[in-house]
Amino acid sequence: MEIKLKEIIADLKKDILNDAEKLVSVSITDLSSKSKNQITTMDERINKLENNNLQKDLLIFGLQENRQGATMEDESNASSSYSQSSIIDLVCKHIKDDLNIHIDRNDINSIFRLKSKPGMKTPPPILISFVSTYKRNEILQASRYKRKQQTKNGSSQSAVYYNERQSKAMAELSYIARSMVRDKKIVSTWVFKGETYIKKSITSNPVRITNLAKLKEFD
């Protein structure tokens, strides 16, 4: 009787230990999952704050500065005073001719051409920070409408295009999303107010992509 009791107690202890190990394992897994979710949420909030700070910024790609004999390296490394003055005139004239939008110097907070990367065959982009979001949004809306019309009419697309400026993390998501469009995993992607959106199919609803895990669901 005493031996059987000891065996029962031993079995109970073993069962209790096994249950305790399972509980600890589940707790650690839950804690790890919660920590990952908290980190993801924090990253998304940081990205949103960064994007909010970039809402007055605009990137112009493909705009060549018409200085006789100047190379792309010359344009990128020109003195800031000369470069800024010439770029303001260039940008204001191009936007007026291209989109019929008047840009005054007082609309611009800062403007400069980014540095050229090695082997770059196109002029480096121009970064403009406007005094308010109004002018930037007006340019973006007009350029998007023009591109839609060009696509609809089958006419050639302009070599110069305008993009919103995104935080580094969101820009990486947009880059991956564009590669997914090329691989035909999704039908389209675009940026709105610094955030990346995609469509899985023509008839599907737009999906806002806030992190890489969300984007991989469509991969």
Image (cartoon, rainbow, N blue to C red):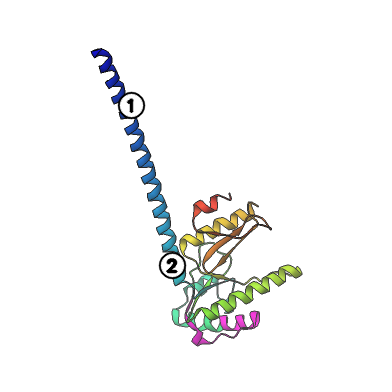
Residue 178, position as x, y percentages in the image: 59, 58
Residue 71, position as x, y percentages in the image: 55, 72
Residue 13, position as x, y percentages in the image: 28, 25
Residue 121, position as x, y percentages in the image: 58, 65
Asked if the residue at tag 1 contacts the one at tag 2, i.e. Cβ–Cβ closer than 8 Å, the answer is no
Residue pictured at 28% horizontal, 14% vertical: 4
Comparing 52 with 107, the one in front is: 52
Identify the image quadrant of residue 125. Answer: bottom right
Comparing 5 with 142, the one in front is: 5
Instruction: Work out whether 207 lies above or below 106.
Output: above
In the rendered image, which quarter contains the N terminus?
top left
Q: Which residue is mark 2?
A: 50
Q: Which residue is mark 1?
A: 15
Instruction: Work out whether 38 lies above or below 15.
Output: below
Residue pictured at 49% horizontal, 71% vertical: 114
SS for dot 1:
helix
Instruction: Work out whether 173 lies above or below 192.
Output: above
Q: Magenta region: which residues? A: 90-112
Dot 1 crowding, Cα within 10 Å, few <14, some 14–19, many 20+ = few
Identify the image quadrant of residue 149. Answer: bottom right
- Choose the circle earlier in sequence order: 2 or 1: 1
